[in-house]
Amino acid sequence: MTSGPVIIVLAAGLGSRFQDAGCKLSQPLGPTSVLGVTLARAMGSRLPVVVITTQALVAEAARHVARRDIVVLEAGARPVEGRGDLRAVNARLGTGASIAAGVSARPNADGWLVLPADMPLVTSATLRQVAAALRDHTIAYAQLHGRRGHPVAFNAELYSELVTLQGDEGARRLVSRYPAHPVEVDDPGVLVDVDTLADLERVRELWARTETVLQ
């Protein structure tokens, strides 16, 4: 595996719009699950990967990445006990908290790519392209035909600001404060997430239509 920026896969969200149908990241997709496909693509980029998730998804994540690369993010007042090589973090669930946990887990990285786990169609090639842009830019993001998508990448110089993110704050504040470089890619997956049951069916149709091969 080559060195470079670390991909932070965000898999600790509550998925409130999907709750009645179970966990969206565990839904079947191709030969595995939504989370499994996203992780396979991330691993296929040959960049280091860390997964921020909850205890409920540890087993699924561990089918694709080493347990040392899993950070368990749980909400609550009591400390979370780590098991085996799992990293455990006590914090409020949310995008900001997840990003901060991922950056904290890999503080010496050259930078970090933030990839939501419910975007399984983002290709390995796209991840490499956005990572390469960090050589010359503080923030970079994938876009398709001028439309902004994911992943969003941050240079190592933003470490101190990224580790202070909390709750659902996300990184929009940073993106608005610093110049962000668009990386135009030929990858519709950068705009497609699984937020509802309808989204899941759309992703499955795209997967079947293109006979996607995990990279």
Image (cartoon, helix red, strand yellow):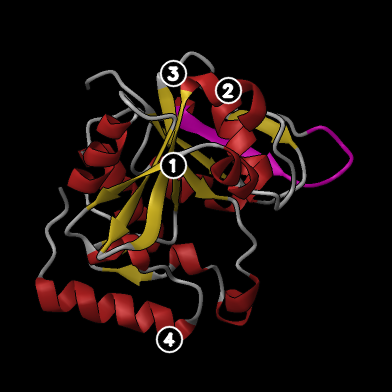
- For the residues labelled 3 and 1, say whether their Cβ atoms are less than 8 Å apart: no
Kindly indicate whether the residue at mark 2 contacts the one at mark 3 (C-beta within 8 angstroms): no
Lower sequence index among marks 4 and 3: 3
Q: Earlier in the sequence, mark 3 or mark 2?
A: 3
Q: Say which element carries label 2.
A: helix
Residue 159 numbered mark, or none = 2
* Residue farthest to the top, as pictured: 108
Give the residue number, with chain letter if any, for mark 4: 198
Q: Position of residue 70 (x, y in %)?
A: 50, 34
Q: Quadrant of residue 110?
A: top left
- Label 4: which secondary element: helix
Residue at 55% from the left image edge and 80% from the top image edge: 21
Indicate whether residue 75 is drawn in magenta. Answer: yes
Q: Earlier in the sequence, mark 3 or mark 1?
A: 3
Residue tagged by mark 3?
109
Q: Earlier in the sequence, mark 4 or mark 2?
A: 2
- Give how far apart the Cα atoms at labels 3 and 1 are: 19 Å
The secondary structure type at the circle numbered 1 is strand
Looking at the picture, how far across and down is residue 36, in whole percent?
A: 34, 54
Please determine whether, in this image, residue 127 is positioned above or below residue 46. below
Q: Earlier in the sequence, mark 4 or mark 1?
A: 1
Does residue 24 sit above or below 44 in this rendering? below
Closer to the camera, 33 or 130? 130
Mark pair 4, 3: CA separation: 37 Å
Give the farthest residue toward the right.
Answer: 77
Q: Percent x, y for residue 50?
A: 45, 33
Q: Is residue 208 above or below residue 81?
A: below
Highlighted range, magenta = 69-79
Graded by Cα atoms within 10 Å as few (under 14), some (14 to 19) or many (20 or more), the crowding at tag 3 reads some
Mark 1 sits on what residue? 180
Q: Are marks 4 and 1 in contact (CB under 8 Å)?
A: no
